[in-house]
Amino acid sequence: MKPFARINLPGVLSLLALLLVWEISARSSKVIHLYFPAISEVVRSLVDLIQSRELVGHLLASLGRFFIGYLLSAGIAVTLGILLGYFRRAYTFSEVLIEFLRPMPSVAMIPVAILLLGIGNSMIVAVTVYACTWPILINTIDGVKNIEPTLIDTGRTFGLGRWKILKRIVLPAAFPYIVTGLRVSLAIALILVTTSEMVVGGNGLGFFILDEERSLKTTNMYAGIVLVAILGYGLNRLFLLVESKAMAWHRGATARG
Amino acid sequence: MSFQVERGEFVSIVGPSGCGKTTLLMCIAGLNPPSAGGVVVNNVQVDGPPPNLVLVFQEFNKSLFAWRSVLGNVLFGLEVRAKLSQDAEEEARKLIKLVGLEGFERHYPWELSGGMQQRVAIARALAYGPEILLMDEPFGSVDALTRLELEDGLLRIWQNLGTTILLVTHDIEEAIYLSDRIYVLSRRPSKIIQTIEVDLARPRNQITTRAQVKFMELRNEIYKQISQ
């Protein structure tokens, strides 16, 4: 997949049309303007907020939490998923627990995390790790468990032991599943970081959005929302870029050709 | 049932579908423990996949590594033997040429036809350098023409490398064409109902060998046995 290869022109046009409708309605009605300040004003205040560095601190705080939480959960969930998928008994022991915890909305754990960790960064990171772990874990387990048995037998007839089969056959075979889990969790990480910041305050984009709303600075609130939207979009693009590089490496490294 | 394969022989097992041919090969390859009895390879009792022995699976499309190119798949056979060196790639390319896939080194398995995929699986097995090659219906799902081609290719390789080959098939003529000896299996409960020495001259030829009276006699005899 080439993330920057083509631009969806009709899609961009309909987004622009929506923004145009927003702009015109905001300018034509005072009531609407109260709730939806014109998008041009929102963009201007976004630029101002960035130039005055007011938003930069919040942005960096959120990004830091996002990356630490996301990468930690990726490391934990992939490792755990491979082991649980590969060793049947380990999975049997943990299946009920996983199926019980997984469907629970992760935001319900925010109070627990506050109780245990207070309202600092570690709490936000912990909640993010918790939430992001499930999709990655489940997909990795699926990828490893659903591996074609003939592939395992192929490794065995070529004289490979259990760990070598894991490394040389199971892992590459499950790779596409793992990537799917990682992609799902990307959005979840952003949700959890923003939500936690709204709850515990202090700094970060989530805090900024809620704080501006409470201060009746609606335009600034929208500026924060737009920034989060851009952030989500950018992170997704970044993921696709890394994914295509990883896929190429994955093939190149294992195939040398 | 009890039978033996000597070093360097080409032996086939023929039998009706569902008589447990695949299970038998899995046991010999040490992938399934036999429910009774035992397998001895090179004077060693089998209780796990023996070294120097590779099984080529019937479902070759499921046994190839989708994330590796043709060259990568064949190199795997060399890698696991820790034979990776400067000339590993050269050797892999030689094997790819041997199975007639020259020019497809950088293709991925899904870009190839069934017959070509099977050749990749065979080349990968040969790269491992096994003394014994077990083959489970290796040409079962390729078209008739490719099949004849692959049979001759396999015979050439066998003669060049001196590998011992045990092949399972339900194709009687294929077994006769390829083998030194054939074990005929009955329906369940399977047992060997006949052992046939194939004394047709080598090198064999798809036209002249199959046209011999002896070839047809053997075919009729085996067919009679199996359909009983």
Image (cartoon, helix red, strand yellow):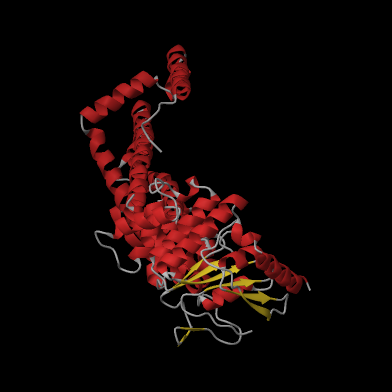
Which of the two residues, A10 or A112, is positioned nearer the viewer here?
A: A10
Image-quadrant location for residue B75: bottom left
Q: Determine if residue A102 is in view.
A: no
Q: Percent x, y for residue B96?
A: 40, 54
Which of the two residues, A24 or B158, is positioned nearer the viewer here?
A: B158
Count all numbered tags in the image, as a single digit. 0
Image-quadrant location for residue B51: bottom left
Q: Is residue A168 above or below residue A64?
A: below
Q: Percent x, y for residue B131?
A: 42, 74
Which of the two residues, A123 or A92, is positioned nearer the viewer here?
A: A92
Residue lying furthest top: A28
Task: Tell me the quarter of the image containing the N terminus of chain A.
Answer: top left
Q: Is residue B9 left or right of residue A220?
A: right
Question: Residue at horizontal 37%, vertical 45%?
Answer: A243
Residue lying furthest right: B228
Question: Residue at horizontal 44%, vertical 71%?
Answer: B163
